[in-house]
Image: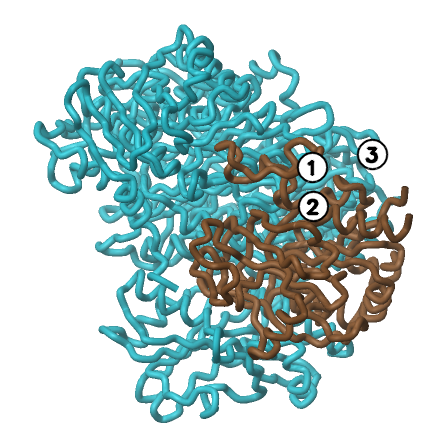
Amino acid sequence: MYTPKVAVLFGFGINCDHETAAVFEMVGGKSTRVHLNSFITGLDELSNYDILAVPGGFSFGDHLGSGRLMGNRMRFSLREELSKFIQAGKPIIGICNGFQVLVKTGLLPGPDTNEPDFIQRASLTLNDSGRYEDRWVTLEFNQDSNCIWTKGITQIDCPVRHGEGKYVMPDRESLAKLSANNQITVRYVDPNNQYNSNNDEVLPFPKSPNGSMMNIAGISDKTGLVFGLMPHPEAIYAQWLHPDFTRGTAPSTNSEISWEGQGLQIFRNAVDYVKSIND
Amino acid sequence: MQITRVEATPKSGEGLKDVRGDVVRRRLKADHNIDFSEVRSIVGFLINSDINATLISERADDLFADPIIEYSTTNQTFLQSPEIFSATPDIVISVGFKPGVTDNPGKAALDGFRTIFPSASLDSDISTYITYAFYGVNGQATPEFIASKLYNNLIERAVISDNEMCNNGDWPMIEYPEKPPQEFKQPAHIDLEITDEQLIEISETGLLALNLEEMKTIQSHYRDETIQSARKEVGIVENQPTDVELECLAQTWSEHCKHKIFASKIHHKDLETGEESVVDSIFKTHIMKPTHDMQKEVDWLLSVFHDNSGVIAWDDEWSVCMKAETHNSPSALDPYGGAMTGIVGVNRDILGTGLGARPIANTDVFCFGPPDWQGDIPENLFHPSRVLRGVHSGVRVGGNESGIPTINGAIVFDERYLGKPLVYCGTVGLMPRKLPDGRESHIKTPSSGDVVYMVGGRVGYDGIHGATFSSLELTEESPSSAVQIGDPITQKKMLDMLLEARDAGLITCITDNGAGGLSSSIGEMAEYTNGCRIDLAKVPLKQPGLSPWEILVSESQERMTVAVKTEDSAAFERLAQLHEVEATAVAEFTSTGMFHVQYDESTVAYLPIEFLHDGVPQLQLESEWVTPKHATFVPPTDADHNSILIDMLARPNIASKETWVRQYDHEVIAQTAVKPFVGVERDGPADAGVIAPIHGNPRGLVISCGIAPRYSDIDAGAMAAAAIDEAVRNAVCVGVDVNKIAGLDNFCWPDPIQSEKTPDGKFKLAQLVRANRELERICRAYRLPCVSGKDSMKNDYGKGANKISIPPTLLFSLFGDHPDVRNTATSDFKAAGDRIYLVGESLNELGASEVSFMLKENGTCDGIGGTVPNLDNPAKLFKSYVALSKAINSGLVKTAHDCSEGGVGVAVAEMCIGGRTGANIDLDGTGDESLWARLWGESLGRIIIAVSPENEEKFLETMSGNTTTYLGEVTESQLLTISDGYEEVISTNVQQMVDSWQGTLDMTGGEI
């Protein structure tokens, strides 16, 4: 059986590279932590890999806006390689800082075609609270999305750990289009259902931890291959990482792996997708 | 070269807001009750480059502004723009850095600038500023007062436009901070053939912090004829020290580096018992000896005391190390920069352990003045709320940006920390027992001929005299050069690179550049091979013009010193280049016995390694113990315990710190099983941090701490015992394997050397003796080796009558093994019907208790005196810890909480808060006859647990032979009721307790 090769970027302040590499391995991928400069200088080639993960962290200290400087390095120095990767139909995920990077390179939400144009159409900005916070949220997944990463997932709990996670777009039309395209893949919801998840009104803090427009937590591009989200699904790879596990109420999964956490399925989906193409 | 100004400001519109401005608005409201209707912000960049303004302007939205959410403008200020700033502000304040101060956003901007303009000249630089525009003030506030809350004069500058200037369109224009030229000075030499008074004067005016005996030891070194002839051979002044040598000796011999008080010979008198004795080094006697004795009994103590942190074997594959440091003096002067430097500094201690360990968890413990302090503030220092905000944000940025989770800590408040806040930062590290090349990772393997690299940041004028400065008391004239701002991203890049170098087998020796700079780092490593030769001219500088002694002792941050075999140099440098990390060969190891420093060809320092490290004479000190007198705490006969509970929960020492702690990333690395807050709403207190650092493996580590400075008021020995017991209890609550725990002792003391400025020095030293005697006694009883520690001995502000001395404070940190994190307990009550027990016994020990301080402060009682909690029989407690840990880590017990400040009353309240559920508690039969002792007393050795009815019997079997008393049951209701037999003493609603507990330290300035 084919073993998908995953490039997990690191360097310049990315800091979730170890756990992101680990979760892909848990679901049958072969992860390599690759310094961004290895791709830029040609020490390694992006085309050697089947999946690209841009993990969370504080690239360049988030100065000048989160993900901005890392995004620029990729936009100006890795443009062709990224274009080819996407057109080859290979999945990309950006988590937290990685999502911010993908938004600022213009890969998310991306153009209406399958060819990336590296134009920024949205942004992730300071939380309304003005505070960086680490807290757990509940996420609801769009069942009509074509995103290969989120297939079959309805709802999970996982932590957000960011100061700049508020998703914004310049006008209502852009948001409406994103919604109509089913590119709004993940949203913050109220786990107690006090607020209706079909409503686009921003949830009160801290159910929405940041004040994101339409409670957006993550989006995908037109192809469904490029996916980014602010919360950290890799941080709930095992149930013992869930804050309720000592209470015996941490959500379980159908997996055969005992104590598997809800976040792992996202990574399994991509690995399985690559396997299904290559087998 | 020309300077171009670019500004960015948030767009307004549906769903958009100026968050940066709003944070300032809410902070002014929370801390000073100044209410503005709106605050807007502008971020500014001053670009000093050969790229012209037109080109920069065209690309401004690619770099300086985010076009989706921000406007940009070039070579003007937005305040002039009627479209964007249509209303005229009432006050405008612009804040920028002073020349030479680390400007991290500027540094990042420069990096981004080079991505866009690769041809920009090499000496291009960018400086940043922030402008705030204030609208609609409600209340009294001068522009100067507002400004003073926004910037720190030591490192920043502010330009202000008041109302009139605003109306005239006269806007603050902050200018590019040109660095003042530094004058390169050839090494001077200093004549020491002078009077004793003159020797002392040299030490004092030079901030050397050396005493007369030490100065005379140096004097006689240069009189030695063999020394003189050796010096002649290398062409350095024969009979006098150069300034490089004197500075180097001062750093190496500083209290900060050499721990002279802990190494001193103490003539100890106990005026109560008549005991007279001599302690020949507290450290060797009470800390090192017990640990070495324990080392003979276990096989997991790999490396203790001599490295940058203590290392224990965790399993066959991995070892774990931990270190805690303080950064008190810099945090007093610049809370943000000082604290950030503290956390990133201790991270480097881990990276510098063995051949390099990876930092995997941070801890932080702060001691501050009361956050709502209304009294005077010592000159040059800040209000405690400002210190809290600054220190917190320095540690937050340092930890979060480094990708290291902060999993445990505490914040303690006492008026005396006004004079000097305590900022303890700790880090846990993980390393493979063996490297791919077969070397054991905890052993350094340098040899003569190895190339010594300085890696990471450059050397600047910042951080000169940090080590000696922290060995003196704070005064109004404390120097600004001793303060620095950390740069976590430069350090993170270095960390990534060095861990790759380690795994590639390229490193033979590594250490951190902290106190004393290169002089300490290379000097200490040179002990392994017995010699080194350094060329200071090779050291990369932040700005030209630094003199040789400044280069040698500067404590500029983010630097490691790394030794590499000559044949590995090329590979090491390639790796550095890939990671964009600066690595410069500046020295080599020798076996000459000499610390040999050159500047190009000329020798500027030539000191025997032995003299440098072992030449400092042992201090001879006196201590004298008399028990302090306090009015006895006599509880009132009629008291409303309901309102006492609500008031106690609001005490800063007890109140929830969630606002602050939630801003730390406590989950990066995906390993944190027990997080700082637990329970239904994830807002109940956790007792200890639990992590499972090997992905996919539930084997865990427990990290906890204990601190009890108030007990020092009665007996510093009891204070130390309480701190250790608390750290152990906290670890037991989550199910630590008590057979594999290790500790760190971090002492912060007021100056304990008797002198004119410290007339009570003998007493303070006696407190230190008692604390260490108790440390030894308890650690031996708990089989708890101290593997690393630190002391900070000059925590005073000012001199004479207005002197403020901190209460003697021991922070005890603990790390230990956890067999399986899936079997752990948390403090929140889990389910109605769970049976509640008290493990341990409540004695009549209300002296210096939190309730005594509260009732004294509100005038109900006269004093805090009485019996302070003591550990008379630690062996008995240890036995109960062994049993309880077993009950928890075998999965029998899911709820456990330590009983400390506020006793059983506060502990069960917190357990109700975490579980959002009520409980019925009966205190009858839990110890002393006094209800106060059983309800509010802080006797050690007590833990409250709850167990499900089906596990109750097995639990009691496990605990058999240990004092375990039934307290009551968790209930369906939202009511905590506490009775003493038939008498109900407390009946309080859970939500009321939540509100009180969470209100005090919220400090967010209201809704967003």
B715 w.r.t. A276: above or below: above
* Quadrant containing the C terminus of chain B in the rendered view: bottom left
Q: Which residue is drawn at 29% across and 71% down?
A: B35
* Quadrant containing the N terminus of chain B in the rendered view: bottom right
- As drawn, the chain in cyan is B
Q: Do the residues labelled 1 and 2 touch (CB within 8 Å)?
A: yes
Q: In this view, does B648 lie to the left or right of A83?
A: left
Q: Residue B436 carries which label?
A: 3
B30 w.r.t. B96: above or below: above
Dot 3 crowding, Cα within 10 Å, few <14, some 14–19, many 20+: few
Residue B294: x percent and y percent? 56, 15
Chain letter of the residue carrying label 1: A
Measured in 3D between alpha carbons, the distance from the residue under mark 1 to the one under mark 2, in whole angstroms, is 9 Å
| Residue behind mark 2 | A265
Q: Which of disc 2 and disc 1 is earlier in sequence?
A: 1
Whether labels 1 and 3 belong to a single chain: the reply is no
* Among the 4 quarters of the image, the one containing residue B851: top left
The amino acid at mark 1 is: Ser
- Of helix, strand and loop, which one carries label 1? loop
Nearest the eye: B15 or B371: B15
Chain letter of the residue carrying label 2: A
- Display colour for chain A: brown
Measured in 3D between alpha carbons, the distance from the residue under mark 1 to the one under mark 3, in whole angstroms, is 35 Å
Whether labels 3 and 2 belong to a single chain: the reply is no
| Residue behind mark 1 | A255
The amino acid at mark 2 is: Gln
- Of helix, strand and loop, which one carries label 3? loop
Q: Residue at x 23, y 73 (%)?
A: B139
B176 w.r.t. B465: above or below: below
Q: Are marks 3 and 2 in contact (CB under 8 Å)?
A: no
